[in-house]
Image: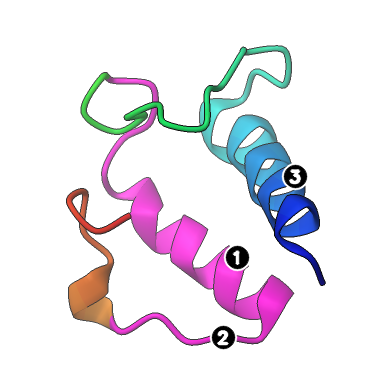
């Protein structure tokens, strides 16, 4: 899977499931947790999605606002 496909899938998931506004103009470099667009506890949901969708593993210490 290429990088553009990964970005598209993650962006769609964030907008659909976490922001709950698929029309929001999410920028690639947007800080969506600290600006209030998404609550920090949603990072765990994002981590689970990434692991399930792409077959990876994100260690719990890496599921922080600073690292995501």
Q: Quadrant of residue 32?
A: top left
The quadrant in which residue 17 appears is top right
Q: Is residue 37 above or below residue 54?
A: above
- Labelled disc at residue 36: none
Q: Position of residue 19 (x, y in %)?
A: 53, 27
Q: Nearest the camera: 5 or 38?
A: 5
Distance (Cα) linking label 1 and label 3: 13 Å
Q: Badge 2: how crowded within 10 Å, few (<14), some, or many (20+)?
A: few
Q: Is residue 51 magenta?
A: yes
In this view of the protein, which residue sits in the foreground, 29 or 14? 29
User: Which quarter shows the N terminus?
Assistant: bottom right
N-terminal of the two: label 1 or label 3? 3
Rate crowding at label 1 as few (under 14), some (14 to 19) or many (20 or more) other CA atoms within 10 Å: some
For the point 38% across and 21% down, the residue is 37
Residue identified by numbered label 3: 8
Left or right of residue 31, residue 28 in this image: right
- Rendered image: mark on residue 49: 1
Q: CA distance from mark 1 to mark 2?
A: 10 Å
Q: Coloring scheme of the render?
A: rainbow
Q: At 65% across and 18% down in the image, what residue appears?
A: 21
Residues at marks 1 and 2 touching, judged by CB atoms closer than 8 Å: no
Q: How many marks?
A: 3
Task: List x then y, in percent, for residue 18.
Answer: 53, 37
Local SS, label 1: helix
**Front one among 54 and 43:** 54
At which x and y percent is residue 48? 52, 71
> Can you identify the residue that label 2 sits on?
56
Magenta stretch: residue 11 in it?
no
Point out the stretch of residues depicted in magenta: 36-59
Q: Is label 2 in a helix, a strand or a loop?
A: loop
Q: Is residue 39 left or right of residue 64?
A: right
């Amino acid at each position: 899977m290429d990088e553009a496909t990964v970005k598209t899938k993650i962006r769609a998931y964030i907008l659909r499931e976490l922001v709950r506004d698929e029309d929001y103009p999410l920028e690639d470099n947007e800080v969506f947790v600290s600006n209030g667009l998404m609550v920090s506890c949603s990072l765990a949901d994002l981590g689970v999605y990434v692991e399930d969708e792409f077959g990876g593993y994100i260690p719990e210490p890496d599921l922080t606002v600073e690292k995501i």
